[in-house]
Image: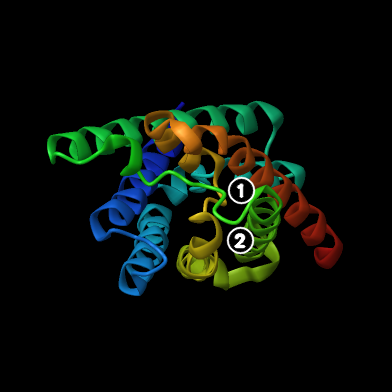
Amino acid sequence: MKKYLAELVGTFVLTLLGCGAAVALGCSDDNTAAVVGTAIAFGLSVVAMAYTIGGISGCHINPAITLGVFLSGRMNAKDCGMYMLFQVIGAVLAAAVLAGIVSTAGLDVATNTGANGATFGTTNALLVEVVLTALFVLVVLGATAKTNGATNNFAGLAIGLSLILIHLVGIHFTGTSVNPARSIGPALFAQGQALQDLWIFIVAPLVGGALAAGIWKVIDE
């Protein structure tokens, strides 16, 4: 149970601090500083949690990563399902806290919870999220592989830095999810278009995670 609770806490922190930074900085296409700041916030959140709960649960804090790890044969089906469940719970709790902060600050909860949107259309969003998630999960699988030996000690840093890069590329197109749980929480409170587009940010990252597992099996054999 400890590892499931660790995933809940880790996903809570990632969602609250990452999406919170996006809201606080006013992240948008025409605000480059805010885009960079938001990307860094998501990346540093992962680094912080990797060294906080990594020894307990492995610090997936992302259903796409959990699926990739499962398909790579590194965890069983029960843990896979429970990890995903607690990740979503953590993200929803974080979104609730963020929505509370936003509302008490006199802002519109529907547009200030860090939810994703398919800015350039469904096809574009699917493509962007599949590719970026596949790249991200591939880094996770590689950085944490036993074949990497001593470099495992720096896995959290490598994963966090790669997430910054992923966000710098993806924010313009989709707001960057690459994490179903991180999108589910905010969308439940944002409602509207964010909720209508939510399926994209569930399906595409999971497809990307599965694709990464397949690629890793090929290159790691």
How far across and how far down the image is residue 34, in percent? 32, 67
Q: Quadrant of residue 6?
A: top left
Q: Is residue 69 visible?
A: no
Q: Residues within 10 Å of mark 1 (few under 14, many from 20)?
A: many
Q: Which residue is mark 2?
A: 136
Image quarter in which the C terminus is found: bottom right
3D distance between C-alphas at marks 2 and 1: 8 Å
| Three-letter amino acid code of the residue under disc 1 | Ile
Report the residue that reaches farthest toward the left.
105
Q: Which residue is mark 1?
A: 65
Q: Quadrant of residue 142?
A: bottom right
Pick the residue in front: 176 or 16.
176
Q: Which mark is residue 203?
A: none
How far across and how far down the image is residue 164, in percent? 46, 67
Residue at disc 1, secondary structure: helix
Q: Residue at x 67, y 56 (%)?
A: 124
Q: Residue at x 63, y 33 (%)?
A: 80
Is 65 placed left or right of 77 in the picture? left
Asked if the residues shown at circle 2 and circle 1 are in contact, with their CB atoms under 8 angstroms apart, the answer is yes
Q: Residue at x 63, y 61 (%)?
A: 132
Pick the residue in front: 113 or 92.
113
Q: Is residue 132 visible?
A: yes
How far across and how far down the image is residue 94, in percent? 33, 36
How far across and how far down the image is residue 38, in percent? 36, 62
| Three-letter amino acid code of the residue under disc 2 | Phe
Residue at disc 2, secondary structure: helix
Q: Residue at x 80, y 65 (%)?
A: 220
- In this rendering, the count of numbered labels is 2
Q: Between disc 2 and disc 1, whose residue precedes? A: 1
